[in-house]
Image (cartoon, rainbow, N blue to C red):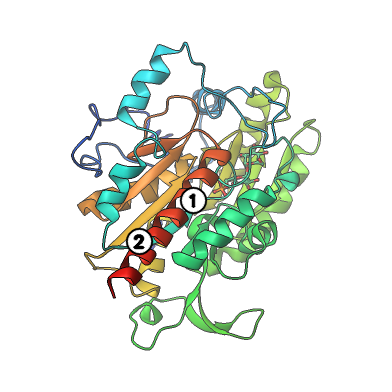
Amino acid sequence: MVQMDFKSNHNSPVLTDQVPVHKSRLRMSSIMPPAATFSSSLFLNIPRRKNLSGKLDDVRASSWLDAMKASSPPSKKLNKEINLDTVPDETDSEYFSWLMKYPSALSSFEQIMNFAKGKKIALFLDYDGTLSPIVDNPEHAFMPSAIRFAVKNAAKYFPTAIISGRSRDKVHGFVGLKELYYAGSHGMDIVGPVRDSESVASHPNCIRSTDEQGKEVNLFQPASEFLPMIEEIFRSLIENTKDIIGSKVENNKFCVSVHYRLVDEKNWDVIAQRVLEILKNYPRLRLTYGRKVLEIRPIIDWNKGKAVEFLLESLGLSNSDDVLPIYVGDDRTDEDAFKVLGEGNKGFGILVSSVPKESHACYSLTDPSEVMEFLRSLVRWKKCELGAAHLLT
Ligand SMILES: O=P(O)(O)OC[C@H]1O[C@H](O[C@H]2O[C@H](CO)[C@@H](O)[C@H](O)[C@H]2O)[C@H](O)[C@@H](O)[C@@H]1O
């Protein structure tokens, strides 16, 4: 059942995930995360009232400016096969104590697989920053073919879904693999499989449809009624930011991204002010942020975590002790998925980051090339497991 959250009294900015997280998470005996201790999505509730004092507006914009400055590590471009956004500094003790809390999923691979023995792994992968390196132009966030190959191979052995902030069509276009499931718009646009007995079909906004190959699928779009509103605000954001050099507004179907990666830092407050000003007219939309991007989306009780639950249900893999869902992602919106998997030890999250960040994930990988390595290791492990099972029969 989709719960709509139309809050009406949005008077002040609420930075809900500014609180640093939990104690040490070095888990040598268990792979599961401790109980979640902070709320995951940072959002600003936009005020309905228009008669706010300019002072309050300034405070809001400066809160956002702080968040924007902290939203992505500085880029250290490397001339490598797969261009990395950043690399860990080997002399950085802060980074190494962070690694104790979020051990590398590669170094801890054996430990993870001990837990996975006899279980069916389901893979959930974010796109930008996870499968494709962060680049300046969002239209050029291509997936290296070696990573595509690793994902394709993994999908032969494990049900695999991409869960992205992009529109579903766009991320499908970038990944280009028909054997995967796709959820776009931060999980607000899902195409999932149809099964004989299923409860997902009873979700409001879930309809039967056919995919490009003519196969019957479930199409779930919990924010479908927001489509005209998102179109409208998209046009308004384009119009109102067109003079800010380097800004880019991206229509992600059920949400909109306002990119400021290429905007001169001295104009970041201008872009934040403009976005906030427009949002005042849309009390049913909220603002979150990611890596050098402001994201405008409907206020509904839906996120990447709920999308993971929906897909598990669609795949017939929910409420089952012999299923191990793994979610790999790099950004704030992925925290909702890490949190869902952490609750009740359903599965675990892997945070892709080369700089210390608090997270609900259990493990870490530095960049997309390590994600590729991890996927390859999973496939090797599965092949061995299947080979051993074959020898026993
Ligand atoms: O959930 P995701 O798939 O990670 O999508 C989140 C946002 O990703 C994209 O922006 C990010 O990647 C761009 C390309 O590397 C980069 O230029 C930008 O600065 C990053 O924020 C996408 O363009 C956004 O629409 C998504 O919201």
Quadrant for the N terminus, please: bottom left
Amino acid on which disc 2 is placed? Glu
Within 10 Å of the Cα at label 2, are there few (<14), some (14-19), or many (20+) other Cα atoms? few
Helix, strand or loop status at disc 1? helix
Considering every residue shown, the one lying at the far left of the view is 29
Q: CA distance from mark 1 to mark 2?
A: 15 Å
Front residue of 356/118: it is 118
Horizontal side of 386 relative to 248 (left or right) equals left
Residue 183 sits above or below residue 130 on the image: below
Residue drawn at the location 57% of the way across and 50% of the way down: 127
Quadrant for the C terminus, please: bottom left
Q: Which residue is mark 2?
A: 385
Q: Which residue is mark 1?
A: 375
- In the rendered structure, which disc, 1 or 2, sits on the residue that comes first in sequence? 1
Horizontal side of 198 relative to 283 (left or right) equals left
Q: Is residue 1 visible?
A: no
> Where does ligand 1 appear, by image quarter?
top right
Q: Provide residue 347's location: percent of width, then percent of height.
A: 30, 53
Instruction: Determine which quarter of the picture holds residue 95.
Output: top left
Within 10 Å of the Cα at label 1, are there few (<14), some (14-19), or many (20+) other Cα atoms? many
